[in-house]
Image: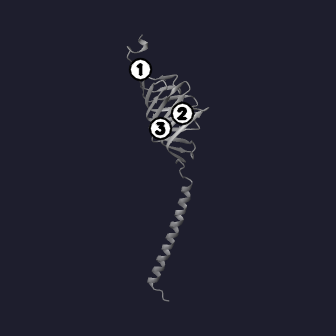
Amino acid sequence: MFLTSKNIKFKNIAYLFSCAIFFIFTSCEDDLTKQKGTDSKNFPSQVINNANIIQRDSGMITLKAYAPVIEKYELIDSPYVVAKKGIKIDFFDKKNPKPGTITAKYARIFEYKKFYEAKGDVRITTNEGRRFVTQSVYWDQRKQRIYTRDTVYQTMPDGSVLINAHGMWAKDDFSEYRFFKNSGEIDMGQNKLAQ
């Protein structure tokens, strides 16, 4: 067999090509092992569509929640449940058969901390008919406190409206609440305070 310059060039090209493929495959393996340690675990482990949740205490319904989608994130350090497409919650009191309601465009619940947050056009109606509208509300269930630093619009059952420019603090059953920097209009002719 005669070696010509054409055969030598072909063998050199084939040799270089096989070396290049070897280095490409080994470099890909190294990148894959580096990526395995930094995989994100922030994805939902459970997804519930058209959620309808009922919570009971001693046989009595204490809460009903409705949401188009609820996602549960359990594989991270601080697990939480989120309703990104909105939520409506009816809460019940032993003293009053009429439920109170909370609606929001977004809600997140930290189950272990018993801490809840609602954001986006938050509307709260108490069992007594008082209505509160704000952009965000936080509920610390352990301390039984609800609070916000956003402007709160409060409508009383008689129709009077108060604007609370720097938020509010309340017990979670709204038996006691406090507002910061209030303003508004009250019709003193129809108000019991005027008499």
Q: Is residue 178 left or right of residue 187?
A: right
**Residue 192 spot, x, y in % from top left:** 43, 13
Compute the Cα span from label 3 to label 1.
Answer: 28 Å
Query: 61 and 132: which one is in front?
Result: 61
Query: 52 and 115: which one is in front?
Result: 52
Closer to the chain start, of discs 2 and 3, is 2
**Mark 1–mark 2 CB contact (< 8 Å):** no
Location of residue 101 with respect to 78 vertically, above or below? above
Describe the element under mark 3 as helix, strand or loop. Answer: strand
Q: Residues within 10 Å of mark 3 (few under 14, many from 20)?
A: many
Closer to the chain start, of discs 1 and 2, is 2
* Residue type of the residue flagged with mark 3: Ile
Location of residue 79 with respect to 62 vertically, above or below? below
Q: Quadrant where the C terminus lies? A: top left
* Residue type of the residue flagged with mark 2: Leu
Query: 21 and 78: which one is in front?
Result: 78
Q: Residues within 10 Å of mark 1 (few under 14, many from 20)?
A: few
Q: Which residue is mark 2?
A: 63
Compute the Cα span from label 1 to label 2.
Answer: 27 Å
**Residue 113 spot, x, y in % from top left:** 58, 36
Picture residue at 41% right of the left edge, 11% below the top: 194
Picture residue at 48% right of the left edge, 76% below the top: 14
Q: Is residue 167 left or right of residue 77?
A: left
Picture residue at 48% right of the left edge, 73% below the top: 17
Q: Which residue is mark 3?
A: 87
Colour scheme: one colour
**Residue 103 spot, x, y in % from top left:** 46, 34
Describe the element under mark 2 as helix, strand or loop. Answer: strand
* Residue type of the residue flagged with mark 1: Asp
Closer to the chain start, of discs 3 and 1, is 3
Q: Which residue is mark 1?
A: 158
